[in-house]
Image (spheres, grey):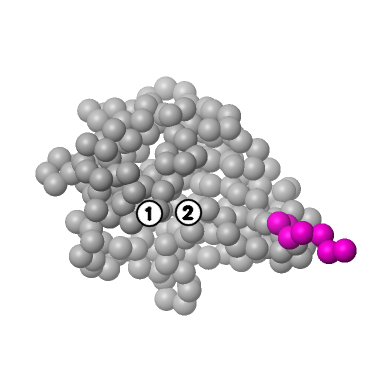
Amino acid sequence: MQSIITQSTRCAPSQDHDRCEPTPDPGSGIGKPPASTTVAAADFPEDRFLVTAYREEKLKEAVMNEEEIRTLDPSDVDFHWDRVYGWITIKLRHGEPKKYFGSIPGVGPAVGVPFLEELMFQPGILSGPEHLQRNPSLTSFCDSAAVASRLRALRRGFNESGRSPWYFVSQARPYRIAWNADRSWRIIERLARPSEGKGQQS
């Protein structure tokens, strides 16, 4: 395992949120992680994978090989999102975990996934339409009604409701939503090699 990066979600004051922004641990060199994998892996002889995990108010990143990611247990986090092999596991408040393959129903790649990522990477931070719209994928979040509609879709996919929230918390006035900071998660993504995406030279 290589390149472990730790970030605390202890916060510093912010005028853009009802709570605060994450403050990186001193020397970590990172703020909010990217919404998608844009880091290029070194020229390793085998594939490398970026594993990002949030638990116990800490955000961690680690670069692993295929053998290492196969040892990860989906049940040791509340939400396990394997973007490499497509397995998704969502622990529920009651009953057996919800399992999907490929995608979460109602959470599309154009808007639903960026929306989910925006909340996940700012656990416990209540955000309104004016903040969410700053994400280029979420410009349609023009008011509370638009945000609430998308949140309902997320909640259906995570098998929860506004009356019994588990992964997503909200407040009515002013309308704000957040990922529940008590819910842990993990995302697994394949790191691109420097040569990928480049045309062949003649």
Quadrant of the image occupied by residue 160: top left
Which residue type carries mark 2? Ala
| Residue situated in front as seen by the camera: 202 or 6 | 202
Residue at label 1? Answer: 135
* Image quarter in which the C terminus is found: bottom right
Which residue is rendered at x = 65% and y = 38% of the image?
85
- Report the span colored magenta: 196-202
Circle number at residue 78? none
Q: Is residue 64 left or right of residue 171?
A: right
Which residue type carries mark 1? Asn
Quadrant of the image occupied by residue 199: bottom right
Label 1–label 2 contact, CB within 8 A = yes
Which residue is rendered at x = 21% and y = 41% of the image?
144
Residue extending farthest left: 173
Query: As displayed, is residue 178 above or below residue 17?
Result: above
Where residue 109 sits: x, y (%)?
Answer: 49, 39
Residue extending farthest right: 202
Q: In this view, does 123 lie to the left or right of 192?
A: left
Residue extending farthest top: 95
Circle 2 SS class: loop
Circle 1 SS class: loop
Dominant SS type (magenta): loop
Can residue 141 be seen in this snapshot?
A: yes
Where residue 50 sits: x, y (%)?
Answer: 61, 55
Where residue 41 sits: x, y (%)?
Answer: 68, 63
| Residue situated in front as seen by the camera: 99 or 110 | 110
* Image quarter in which the N terminus is found: bottom right
